[in-house]
Amino acid sequence: MQTARLNIIGMDHEGCADRLTGALEAVAGVATVCVSLARHGATVQFDERLATQERLLAAVNDAGFMGEATEEEQLASCSGACGHCRH
């Protein structure tokens, strides 16, 4: 399993977070998605044999947002309190 941390531009309400979560979950190989509206980001765990960071970013873009990979650890500590984590 690999973990991708993504900055998301254009996500400004719960509906956006729901749409982004669904888009990322639809990528084959994705195991866990945690979208943080407050941090404008997402943490995604995925099977690198089935998914790539590029595919995740394409799903973000296809959902109507702009995304970029980040190394920031702040998204890694998603506690699930936002209600958008799917395991």
Image (cartoon, rainbow, N blue to C red):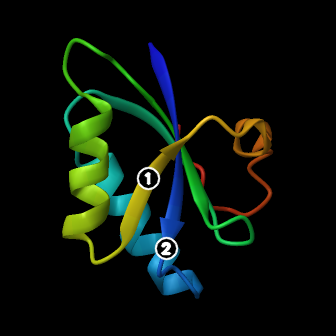
Compared across the picture, whether 78 is left or right of 63 comes to right
Q: Nearer the viewer, residue 82 or 72?
A: 72
> Which of the two discs, 2 and 1, labels the residue nearer the N terminus?
2
Residue 76 image position (x, y, % from top left): 72, 36
Residue 4 is labelled as: none
Nearest the viewer among 44 and 8 is 8
- Residue under pointer 2: 9
Q: Are marks 2 and 1 in contact (CB under 8 Å)?
A: yes
Residue 61 locus on image (x, y percent): 26, 65
Against 73, residue 19 (above or below) is below
Left/right placement of residue 62 relative to residue 30 reads left
Q: Is residue 8 above or below residue 19?
A: above
Label 2 environment density (alpha carbons within 10 Å; few <14, some 14–19, many ≥20) = some
Q: Residue at x 26, y 27 (%)?
A: 29
Residue 64, above or below 75: below
- From the viewer's perspective, tell me whether residue 56 is left or right of residue 34: left
Per the rendering, the mark at residue 68 is: 1
Q: CA distance from mark 2 to mark 1?
A: 9 Å
Q: For the point 80% across and 57% down, which residue is it?
A: 81
